Structure formats: C-alpha cells, structure tokens
Image (cartoon, grey):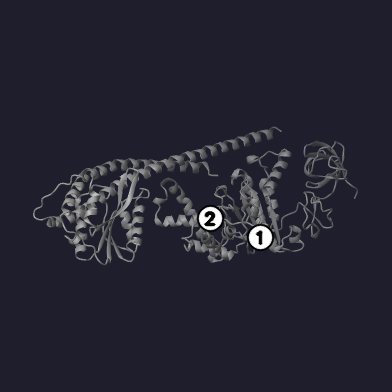
Amino acid sequence: MAENIGKIAQVIGAVVDVEFTPGNLPSVLTALTVTNPTIGDEEDNLVIEVAQHLGDNVVRCIGMDVTDGLQRGMPVKDTGSPIMMPVGEASLGRVLNVVGKPVDGLGDISREKTMPIHRHAPAFIEQDTSVRVLETGVKVIDLLVPFPRGGKMGMFGGAGVGKTVIMMEMVNNIAMQHGGISVFHFRDVEGQDVLLFIDNIFRFTQAGAEVSATLGRMPSAVGYQPTLAVDMGELQERITSTDKGSITAVQCVYVPADDLTDPAPATTFAHLDGTVVLSRQIAELGIYPAVDPLDSTSRILDAVYIGEEHYHVARVVQQTLQKYKELQDIIAILGMDELSDEDKITVQRARKLQKFLSQPFHVAETFTGMPGVFVKVEDTVRSFKEIIDGKHDDLPENAFYMVGSIEDAIKKAKSA
Amino acid sequence: MATLKEVKSKIGSVKKTKQITSAMKMVATSRLRGCQNNMEQFKPYASKFADVLGSIAGKSSSDASPLLVPREEVKKVVVVLCTSDRGLCGGFNINLIEKSRNLIQSELQGKEVSFYCFGKKGRDWVKKSPYTLDAQFLDVVGGKIGFSLASTPGQQLIDSFLEDAVDEVYLIYSEFQTMARQEPRVKQILPIPSLADVVEEKQTDADVSFLPEHICEPSSDALLGEMLPRNVFIQIYDALLQTSTSEHAARMRAMENATKACEDMVAELQGIYNKTRQAGITADLMDIVGGAEALKG
C-alpha cells in the first residue's frame, strides 16, 4: 500500500489540522507522524493523534510533543494504526513515554512485539470473579481495607497527605516480595499475574480535560470534560483480572481541594473494589499512614473472604472509633469528666487504636528515623483484638504510636 | 468536606446546647447563694459548740467516753460519702469518688468496707463497686438540709459503733474553700480522733486567747457523753452543707466553661460554613462562565 501523506492545514497550540486527499482520511485515534525541526533532526519525530474529523478532508489532531516549528504545508504520514507500545520482555525495567520511546537513556527498545494504546476492555464473560486476599504488611490497610488479589484499589487524598509514600511502601512490600512486572501484554499473552501501580490516575482525568478543552468541547461540571465518565470507564475496565491472568492495581487518586465529591475522584470511586481514603485531619495529628479508618472501605471486608475473627475485629475497631468521633463534641463542650465510665474506656481505647494505626514505613526511614516494619495479617488482627479486649488498658497511649505489632508496643512502654 | 446543611444543623445544635448550659449556670448561681447562706449561718453555732467542747474536754480524761477509744483491731469500716445527685458539674463527683478509692486502697487495705451514701452519683459508684451499700440518702444534697438528716444516720453509726458492729467511720465530703476551689476531704469521725484535734479544728483565731471557763452541772464527763454524739452530727451536717455549696459552685464553673466552649465551637463552625458557602458560589460561577465562554467559541 502506498504511503498516505497529508498536509498541515492549521496549527493552534497543541492542535494540528491536517488535510488529506479525498477518500484517504485516517480514522479517529490513528497516529500520524511529522518531522518537527524544533524537536530534533530525526525523521518523523512528532506523533500526532487524530481526534476529530472536521469535514472537507481535514482531520483535527492532538500533538504528543511540542508543535512549535510546524508549518502549513508540511507533509504528514499516516501510520495506519494507533500509537503502538513495545511490550513483552524487552519492555521490562524500562521507562517509556507516551509514544513508546524509551526515556531512561538505556538505548533503543525492540519493537518486535507492540500493542496499540487504545484497546477494548475484556468481555464481561472473560472477567475473573475469584477473591483472594493480598497481604500488604501495612496494619491499617490489612485490617480495615483488605486488598483483593486481582482487584483494584484506590488511594484517595489531597495534596501532601502521603499517597505516594503509601504507594512506594506497597511497591516495597508487595512487589519486592512477588517480583511484579507490567501490564496487559503479560496478562493476556503470557498469562501472568501482574501488579499495576498508578501514580496518579487524576493526571489521566486532567489530561482528558485538557484535550477536551483544546478541542473546544463545552466543559461540564467544575470544568471537566463532558465525557469524563466514559474516559474513566474505558481505562478502568481494561484494568481487570481475566481468566487468563490477573492484574492487581493500586491507584493513587488526587483529590482536588480535599473534596471527595469533586467529579474526578467521584467517577473513579465506582470502578474500584476498595478505597483507602487519606485524611488531612489524621495527617495533622501526626498519624502516618493517614488512612481514615471510617471512610475507607473494601468490598472484601466480609467474613466470607477474610474470616470471622478478622471481620469481627475490624468492625469493633471501626465502631470504637465511630463512637469516639461522636463523643468528641461532648468532650469539646463539657469535658471528659461528664462521660460515663464505659464511654471513658471507649475513648481511651479509641485513642490507643488511633495511635496504633500508625506504622513506620521502610520507604520513609529517612524521614522518621525509624526502621520500617512489615506486619503480618495474623499479627495485625491479634494485636487489635488484644486492644479492643482491653488487655492493654494499662499501657500509656504513646506506646502505641509508630510501632509494629502489639509486642513492640509493650516493649516501647517498658523502655519509656 | 462537610456539606452546608450538615454544618448549619450542627451550628444550630451547638447553639441550643449553649442555651442549656448557660441556663444551668444561672440556676446553679442562684442555688449556690442559698446554700452558701445556710453554710454561713451554721458557722457561729459550730464554732461556739467547739469552744464549749474544748473547754470541757480540758477537764475530762481521755477515755471519758467509749466514742473516744480506738479499737485495737479494725475490721469493719463505714465510709460516709457525700456526692451530688446530678451530673454536669465537672470533676466534682469524680474527685470525691477518687478520694474514697484512694482511702480504701491505702489506709483501709484489707478491711471490710461499707458505705453510707448521700447523693446519687456516689451511690451509683458504690453499687458497681465490690463494697456494700448500708444506707442511701437521695435528693438531699444541694437542697435544703434539715439537721435530722445528719443526726439520724449519725445516731445509727454511733449505735453500731457502740455495739462493736463498726470499728471506724470516715467522712468524705467536698470542702468549700472559694468559689473557684473545692477540695475533697477525708475526716475520721468515729472513734473521735482526740479531743484536742477536734477543738483545734473548730477554733477561730479570735477565740484562742479567751477560752471561757465553764462551770458544769452535773459533771463534765456526763456533759461530754451528751456532747460527743452531737459533735458527730455537726460534722456530718457541716459536710453536707459544704458539699451542697461546692456542688453548685462546681456546676457553675463547669457550665461557664461549657458555654465558652460552645461559643468557640460556633465561631469555628461558622467559619467553615462561610468558607464552604463561598467555595460553592465560586464553583458555580466558574461553571456558568466556562459554559458561556465555550458556547461563544
């Protein structure tokens, strides 16, 4: 087939209009290439993607790199396919940009096996429905927000509450143990179980909003693209476990202005098996990871999946913390003295539980000056059970802060 | 972020709480005046009584009455605990209960303890504790207190002391020092510690130099037999008056603090409310302007 060549008709920022000969119009999402002298001497160094058919044989495209230096009349090549990514063994351990070129300075990458960036989600019937629990080694997550193997978890939080740190700890605790690798090709073709870490899915929404605005679509609520839900759905439905292999995804979701009802985090919620909500109030108390134990949920926090005892302990911990939250107004107005004896015990235990939900991280050793701890799920459940059973009512609150299992807390109380 | 409606209803409920606490403060203030008057009026009698007792005690032997003789082996102890009937008075009752707990754990270790309770709060605590409740007098503390209220249980205690059913009696009450300060106190009332101590406590400075000499008929020992039980009643009565006054003072203070805390909370919530409201308006405006701009292009 002869090469299909078009000509640049108009350049407005990242938007490039290209005119083709009649009958040779490339379809939407097709990648086109053009040589931009501003980027370098290399041929076809700028990839632009067809976004719209304007009529009169003109297509509107989005540039994937700088479009400065483009001129009207420049020749544009139709590659006949969407942007392709190198996949398979060759891509392992490499850092790629959006058009599949390596940016880690380790040389060229074999393009023997490639896959388009736009693909359909696996059919409903191919999806895997089995549930197993994935141990993360982080107390608060293992106890209250258990991660399903092959599931999707989101970590929601505003700026600077520690999303990335938790994610790095996850990479450290899970990936180091299991030796995870990257994504769809390995699931679909090699049939492997894959771990996917995304930091940060909000950027996807943000990019979509920018493209939408650039193309002149009418913005929807809070300035997001009108197609927000579809965009998010198309991406999220591809991240799923199938009968061939599983993907366990951990996604950070930035929450603009700490407002969880903002459309970007709100549309992400629906696709996840569980949500770890990071709260600024908890971060302000100095409790890291700043997971909000009452807002965070997991689909598999259910006795069927995690066992009766774990479920019971998790629920009692939540109830205790909930009760404490309700009592806080009374304490603020009337003081601790007016509480009944049971409520006083509840408050004391809740404060201990709250402190005990903190944990030193491996990846944060340089900040905390404390060695990180990996706590096994059994130890986590046992430790929390002992606290709610009142076995450690005599220990000072501070002993529960930044420790691993309950034995560490006892040790800390003795040494203090 | 809290929704506007939530914040608004919370502001409403805190404001209502504030109304209640400030009303309770006013009630406590007016009742405090009554109680304080009663307490002040009783003082001259108590101090004169101490004078007379002191003067007679000087002439009597230390074992003139069985009420003065300590038991060699103390087995059964009664604690008379004065608390309030109602809560919302800060740490008032908790401090008194804490005092009893400390007393039992230190001096009364290993002895059989039972309670005479004035006031519901102390009674409730005793009921939950391993100790027995011998008698309870509810709805008296904080109100108008008749002398018989002190003398009846006082006589019971003296009787059981004389029958050897009780070996020691302690009184726990709240001493009214100033409006801002009420201290829980422990006093041993049976056996009467020693007359010198009792007298010293009751004497006011002015009387020290001029102790009147009393001429007694029939004998000072016989008179002492009459006066010592009465001294026990006076101690209990005084404790009740002081506890009542303290309760109201403590409640007044607690409610004042609560009212202040409510005010702070309302101010803080109002700030959140205003901010949220303004953020909503800004977001809506931006949507409208953005939409209009897009339609233009």
From this viewpoint, is residue B32 visible?
yes
Find disc 1 in the rendering and name its residue.
A173
Is A375 rendered above or below residue A224?
Answer: below
Mark 1: few, some, or many residues within 10 Å (few <14, many ≥20)? many
Of the pair B1 and B141, the residue shown nearer to us: B141
Image quarter of residue B248: top left
Which residue is located at x 46 percent, y 43 percent? B10
Mark 2: few, some, or many residues within 10 Å (few <14, many ≥20)? many
Find disc 2 in the rendering and name its residue.
A355
Of the pair A136 and B104, the residue shown nearer to us: B104
- Decide which of tag 1 and tag 2 comes sooner along the chain: 1
In this picture, residue B68 sits left or right of residue B214: right
Mark 1: which amino acid?
Asn
Is B56 rendered above or below residue B78?
Answer: above
Give the letter of the chain under mark 1.
Answer: A
Instruction: From the top left corner, tell me how far across and down residue B239 is, in percent.
Output: 26, 51
Compute the Cα span from label 1 to label 2.
22 Å
Mark 2: which amino acid?
Lys
Instruction: From the top left corner, tell me how far across and down residue B59 is, in percent.
Output: 15, 54
Badge 2 marks a residue whose secondary structure is: helix
